[in-house]
Amino acid sequence: MENPEAPCFVIAPIGSPASAIRLRSDRILAQVIEPAVSQFNYKPFRADQVPAPGLITSEIIWHIANDPLVVADLTGHNPNVFYELALRHAVRKPVVQLIRAGESIPFDTAALGTIQVDDSDDERLKSASAELAEAIRGIHAARFRPETPVSVALRNWVFATAPGLVPRGVFESLIVNFAELTFLLEHDDDNGDFTIHRDVASMLSYILEDLDSISNALGLLSVSEQLPYWKSISATIRGEKR
């Protein structure tokens, strides 16, 4: 059975029907974005193509926050585009930026790198599509970790403060996952059912996510400041008094 296409939300200036903005946006979607993302089994769509009924803004924000890939066209410096792009930056998920060749890239978004799209002819659009595909290939590469101006700033703001201000929920989640993993390992299935191993593997994936958050936090602290955290976690798992 073929895998279903994953959604790829496209942040872009849309304009009114038949306007120059709409016609260009349609062309970029059809000739640059769609050919590139389809190679990786993504289905691209813009805000005006969201099919669900209800409050459209909520649907758009949901896709911005949850879709596995977002492509953002910064052409024309549209304020809605930058609002939506900021939301994507805040959730620290993969996003590739495009802009019409020759237009300036605002300072706050320049650090991520932006594909220059020359829309003067179809061959140049094809070249931009190939560049977009290469960017997506890089996103799919092992150990890729999205970084955005927002994620970097927030991490420095939160985790560069005193150790006690590192979010408690991160540690509590780690403790709960380790406790459950310990239980699974200590209560092996006597019937030889391998379901236990799938459960352990699933739990390990959650733990690794938490460890990633921990390492981001503690990486900005000295070794001597790290030790109390790990001792506290270890003691809690063993049921010892902190």
Image: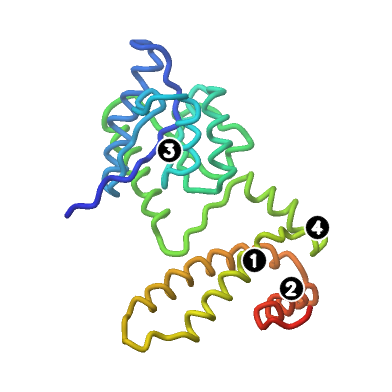
Mark 1 or mark 2, which is nearer the start of the sequence? 1
**Residue under label 3:** 71
- Give the distance between the C-alpha atoms of the residues marked 4 and 1, in whole angstroms: 14 Å
**Residue under label 2:** 229
Residue furthest to the bottom: 190
**Residue under label 4:** 161
Q: Position of residue 23 (x, y in %)?
A: 34, 17
Mark 3 or mark 2, which is nearer the start of the sequence? 3
Q: Which mark is residue 214?
A: 1
Mark 1 or mark 4, which is nearer the start of the sequence? 4
Mark 1 or mark 3, which is nearer the start of the sequence? 3
Under mark 2, the amino acid is Tyr
Secondary structure beneath dot 2 equals: helix
* 2 or 3: mark nearer the eye: 2
Residue displayed at 53% across by 40% down? 88
Placement of 77 over or under 112, stated as above or below: above
